[in-house]
Amino acid sequence: MDQTLRINEVFFSIQGESTRMGLPCVFVRLAGCHLRCAYCDTEYAFKEGTTRSIDDLVAEVSDFPCDLVEITGGEPLLQERAHGLMSRLCDLGKTVLVETSGACDIGACDERVVRIVDVKTPGSGELARMDWSNMDRLRPCDEVKFVVTVRADYEWAKEKIAEYGLVERVGAVLVSPVFEQPAGLEIVGARGLSMRDLAAWILADGLNVRLQPQLHKFIWDPQTRGV
Ligand code: SF4
């Protein structure tokens, strides 16, 4: 019998983050997450999902006119079979990105997969869940993201970037101001941070990181799903 995954949604949109920001991209959002970040904007993926075969998913992804695919969540690496899906997509010549919380071992990913690790800042409320051994597994093609909620998060991120030599070791260090997020059933929500303030802090420190918005939230309504 074909292997299956719990899938929240599959959609074709503009990549809103990472160094591929602005490019058309197919997204496969896996259901489930063991974290409850204060600012999570995909709370609906915690439990909503359908069981889909990997064959079916590969066929659906292949139908889009696009060779860039992001596997996201929720936390995609909670489902071990996600590795099988990613390898199948790599075999087809797709550029496969996985966006992961940093709380799961990234070492099991196919070596062709680009890992984008969201390092949980103190403001996320989930710092204690970070698997710091992932920092040793990063390669030059991978990317690391920090979502900054307040100045203290920025100062903390700056220390971690230096401690792990991230600017020198990965393809990009992405720093994002948190977007305002209303409280939900399982998350506390977050106040937004000004992109201009974050830009000023980065420039004052001469920090060699990439400031990134969540582009899709400027194109569409921030609460829109499937974009
Ligand atoms: S890791 Fe955090 S932000 Fe990502 S899906 Fe889970 S709760 Fe949401």
Image: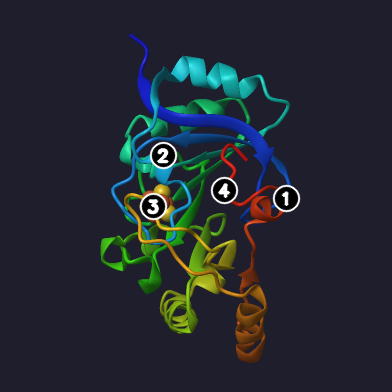
Whether the residue carrying mark 2 lies under 8 Å from ligand 1 is answered with yes
Residue at x-position 62% and y-position 40%: 227
Q: Amino acid at mark 4?
A: Gln
Q: Can you give x and y, in whole percent of width and height, for residue 172 in the image?
A: 59, 64
Report the residue marked by disc 4: 223
Q: Amino acid at mark 1?
A: Ile
Q: Nearer the viewer, residue 6 or 91?
A: 6
Could you classify mark 1 by the number of other residues whose Cα lies within 10 Å: few (under 14), some (14-19), or many (20 or more)? few
Q: Is residue 140 above or below residue 155?
A: above
Q: For mark 4, give the secondary structure.
A: loop
The residue carrying mark 1 is 219
- Looking at the picture, the colour scheme in use is rainbow
Could you give the CA–CA distance between mark 1 and mark 2, rounded to whole angstroms?
Answer: 22 Å
Cα separation, mark 2 vs mark 4, equals 13 Å
Marks 1 and 3, how far apart in space?
A: 23 Å
Mark-to-mark CA distance, 3 and 4: 12 Å
Q: Which residue is mark 3?
A: 184
In the picture as drawn, the residue positioned furthest to the bottom comes out as 204
Could you classify mark 2 by the number of other residues whose Cα lies within 10 Å: few (under 14), some (14-19), or many (20 or more)?
A: some
Q: Which residue is mark 2?
A: 45
Task: Name the N-terminal-most of marks 1 and 3.
Answer: 3
Q: CA distance from mark 4 to mark 1?
A: 11 Å
Q: Amino acid at mark 2?
A: Ala
The image shows residue 91, relative to residue 217, as above or below, that is: above
Can you say whether 205 is above or below 76 in the image? below
Q: Secondary structure at mark 3?
A: loop
State yes or no: discs 1 and 2 in contact (Cβ < 8 Å): no
Vertical position of residue 192 compared to residue 35: above or below: below
Element marked by disc 1: helix
Give the crowd class for mark 3: few <14, some 14-19, many >=20 residues within 10 Å: some
Q: For the residues marked 3 and 2, what is the alpha-carbon distance in whole angstroms?
A: 12 Å
Whether residues under marks 3 and 2 lie with C-beta atoms below 8 angstroms apart, the answer is no
